[in-house]
Amino acid sequence: MLDNLKSSLRAAIKKIVNSSGIDEELIKELSKDIQRSLLQSDVNVKMVFEITKNIENRSLNETPPPGLSRKDHIVKILYDELAKLLGNETEFHFQSGKVNKVLMLGIQGSGKTTVTSKLAKFLTKQGYRVAVIGADTFRPGALTQLKTMCEKSDVEVYGENGNENPSEIVKNGLKHFQKTNLDIILIDTAGRHKQEKDLLDEMKQINKTADPDLALLVIDGTIGQQCFTQAEAFHKTVPVGGIIITKLDSSAKGGGALAASAATGAQVMYIGTGERIDDLEVFSPTRFVGRLLGMGDIQAVLDLAKRLENEADDVRMKRISSGKMNMEDFYYQLEEVTKVGSFQGLLDT
């Protein structure tokens, strides 16, 4: 997955790890390497310069907590900033005690029907009772494909051959599953483009009929940073609650797709990593960055950094309370006081 980005980021990390010492020249070189890696993965130029500026500034100006080497601290900074680029670390939970309706959206060719069947299996394996409504009336064979793939997971699919009204199919499908004991109903819809007004209007009508708890937008990872405009256009029509990015295993632009999708504010919830029905996983920015950097134990570095920061604070407070503070402690106290604001402001409250 994203082999070029992986190898170039890891090469940049090696420069830091193998260096005899850290200086400004090396950090600027690291910054340029990261820029090159991200731009080659089709990450938006503005975002690239913003993240590398942050990495450079933090690497040059931040003091590592006592006990953490400067090299490890720079790796932590790189890890933090890359994870931030890819969105928030939040997990979506379906509501219990009700049927969660999930509307599947996407442009033509994004692999939406395939993803719908993959998601059905994924959720079934998690213990959810899942059914699917096939409301793609545009693409010939869509319903047959959906039924064939979902059959492998023992997931029932409702569809109506010959009915070209997707809203009606959704309405009938919801009625069909009304008396079944389900947790989630996935609703597969026809692919559409942001410039096809009629199809977007149709999507609005389907959304109104379905009244979904969640709308998931399926995006092809090979389109890179164009994901941003596509996601934004769909979001203006139907509130998109989450994004699934497909074909990350075969795209050099996957990094751009992830970053652009995260920039829309919608959560990247799942990623497709292959063609098999099991090749779908929950997206975690921190885990993803850890894999990119080839550092499975990166969390250990982060935990150590946090622990050392806390320990340093405890030691400092003991010195201050005992009256044995040094100049660094005095400077720390001054900084904390300035965060409070002016004394006049305190008196006015």
Image (cartoon, grey):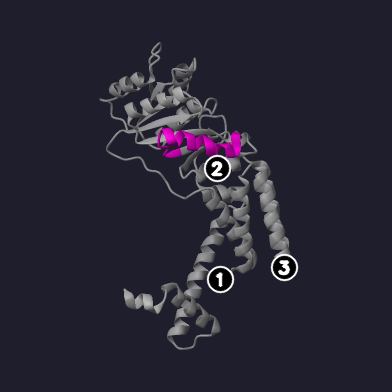
How far apart in space, not on screen, are marks 1 and 2 (Cα)? 33 Å
Q: Earlier in the sequence, mark 2 or mark 3?
A: 3
Residue labelled with disc 3: 21
Identity of the amino acid at label 1? Pro
Quick check: marks 1 and 2 in contact, CB under 8 Å? Answer: no
Magenta stretch, residue numbers: 223-242
Residue labelled with disc 1: 65
Residue labelled with disc 2: 260
Q: Earlier in the sequence, mark 1 or mark 2?
A: 1
The residue positioned 35% from the left and 76% from the top of the image is: 346
Query: What is the quadrant of the N terminus in the image?
Result: top right
Residue 144, visible in the rendered structure: yes
Quick check: marks 1 and 3 in contact, CB under 8 Å? Answer: no
* Residue 246 found in image quarter: top right
Which mark, by number, is residue 186? Answer: none
Q: Chief secondary structure of the magenta span? A: helix
Which mark's residue is nearer the viewer, 1 or 2? 2
> Is residue 22 positioned above or below 265 on the image?
below
Whether residue 231 appears in magenta in the rendering, the answer is yes
Q: Earlier in the sequence, mark 1 or mark 3?
A: 3
Whether residue 58 appears in magenta in the rendering, the answer is no
Image coordinates of residue 330 in percent, x first then y, are 50, 83
Quick check: marks 2 and 3 in contact, CB under 8 Å? Answer: no
